Image (cartoon, helix red, strand yellow):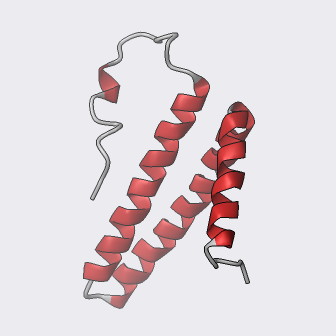
Amino acid sequence: MLSEIPKGFGKIKEFDSRISDAELARIGLIAELDAINLYEQLAFLARDPLVRKVFLDIAKEEKEHVGEFLELLKRLDKEQVEALEEGAEEVKEMGGEKE
């Protein structure tokens, strides 16, 4: 299922100073996550192995874009960095040690 965050976003006619760069990075992150889901779902539906392979390759590229937006967001929002670290710690405590 795709998010609705970018929906209507194109209606902004002029630069809105209320939109922070961190918010823009989050919108980009959401769009890339949506794209990954879409391409992986399409790959699952594809009958032709080449079509499946292309969709999965594109999904992999989108995952790199997620990394770019996440790094950008971490530079723009220090509170987000702390929240990511706290979330990772919570998963470890639940038995989700990284191998």
Counting from the top left corner in percent of width and height, residue 45 is at 25, 80
Counting from the top left corner in percent of width and height, residue 10 is at 33, 26
Nearest the camera: 5 or 93? 93
Image point (34%, 28%), residue name: 9
Image point (43%, 82%), residue name: 53
Image point (28%, 35%), residue name: 7
29 sits left or right of 83 in the view: left
In this view, 49 is above or below 38: below
Nearest the camera: 34 or 93? 93
In this view, 59 is above or below 44: above
State how many labels appear: 0
42 sits left or right of 31 in the view: left
88 sits left or right of 61 in the view: right
Image point (70%, 62%), residue name: 89
Counting from the top left corner in percent of width and height, residue 52 is at 37, 81
Which of the 4 image quadrants contains residue 12? top left
Quarter placement of the C terminus: bottom right
89 sits left or right of 6 in the view: right
Counting from the top left corner in percent of width and height, residue 30 is at 45, 47
Quarter placement of the N terminus: bottom left
